[in-house]
Image (tube, rainbow, N blue to C red):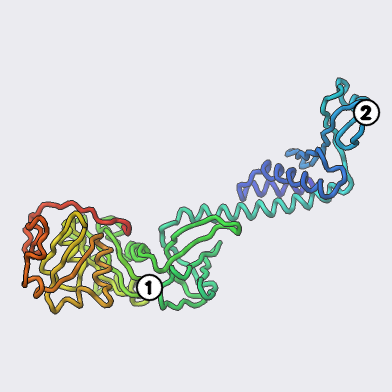
Amino acid sequence: MNKELLQALDELQSTKGISKEVILDAVAKALEKSYEKNFEDETNVEVTADPETGDFHVVQIREVVEKVEDPIGQISLEEAQKSMKNAQVGDTVRVEVKPNNFGRIAAQTARNIIIQKLRDAEREAVYDAYIDRMKEMIIGTVQRTDHNNIYINLGKTEGVITKREQIPNEHLHVGDRVKLYVCDVRVSSRGPQILLSRAHSNLVARLFEQEVPEIADGIVEIYSVSREAGSRTKIAVYSKDPNVDPIGACVGYKGNRVNLIVDELNGEKMDIIIYSENPKEFIANALSPSEVTHVILQEEEKAATVIVPDDQLSLAIGKEGQNVRLAARLTGWKIDIKGEAQYNEDPSAFEPVNKDEAIDIFALPQDKEKETEEGDEAEHA
């Protein structure tokens, strides 16, 4: 058994990186507990392992006394001096014992410990592999579903999409291959938990990074993403190269790039807008596809009143307020939409403390100075 055990431990050490000494030490500690259950003289016992031979030794720790009252915990001076000539009353001696069937118990215990260590090593390997992939996109296959969760086969392990991370009204079936965002990797008693998402805004960002070479190369950058999964997403982009149109790069020839993303997300609408360091321009762009004539800022409140043509009011606000809600998340500004008729009745009512803030965004000079952008970057890609 010992020769086979050492061969198995050497193989584990080379293939799984599990130290032979660590396993032997774990087996020895387990045998101490096992000894208590299987033998009467269970007290004061130590089990040690020889890493060279794989042998396990059981020793009892006894106190040297003149008169033995506890044969398990005590040893007479005369008996002690047989193995340790200088032993004196009050000393502690270690006496090796060889209980019956201990070899069989040791073999079974070693087997169980090795199995457990293998499981632990595999769990650790899975954790290490996926902790490095947090906030990235991966591909998995739908393995099974229940009323609330969808379980994804990732190859060596399983991930889960909880109900809140699913796209509303998306129906995934067993065997479907899907792209997913790794939200979190947690340690549990049953091993690592890989928490996945189809609804996270960063999934859209990762899809654009995959489909748009200019984003992957860093020429075009994503500033922020605002998403209501299954319905609509707004994504703000800008180009570091004046010769590269960021929207054109994201849309692709005849819309081929953005259409791949829309198809992956089951027809979810995509609004691609240009980010500007000027908050007035950024807010106006974010309210696409509606037209905007004036943007009035209240800097301290981080709030903006936006004036649009009366026939664009419903478009600017969007169904159930979706367009303005997504624009507010995208820019980090509170946005209030007003019609031109209301504005024209009394423009002064909309003026902030600094009247220069009331401007027609289409009259901005081309060489305008950069204004400070303090937008909420919580949804940065």
The span from disc 1 to disc 2 (Cα, nearest Å) is 84 Å
Q: Is residue 381 something one can see in this rendering?
A: no
Left-right relation of 325 to 344: right
Q: Is residue 170 something one can see in this rendering?
A: yes
Question: Which residue reaches farthest top?
Answer: 86
Residue 87 quadrant:
top right
> In this view of the protein, which residue sits in the foreground, 224 or 130?
224
Residue 302: x and y in percent read 21, 57
Residue 311: x and y in percent read 14, 79
Discs 1/2, front = 2
Q: Quadrant of the C terminus?
A: bottom left
Residue 143 quadrant:
bottom right
Residue 138: x and y in percent read 44, 63
Q: Which mark is residue 264?
A: 1
First in sequence: mark 1 or mark 2?
2
Give the labeled residue for mark 2: 67
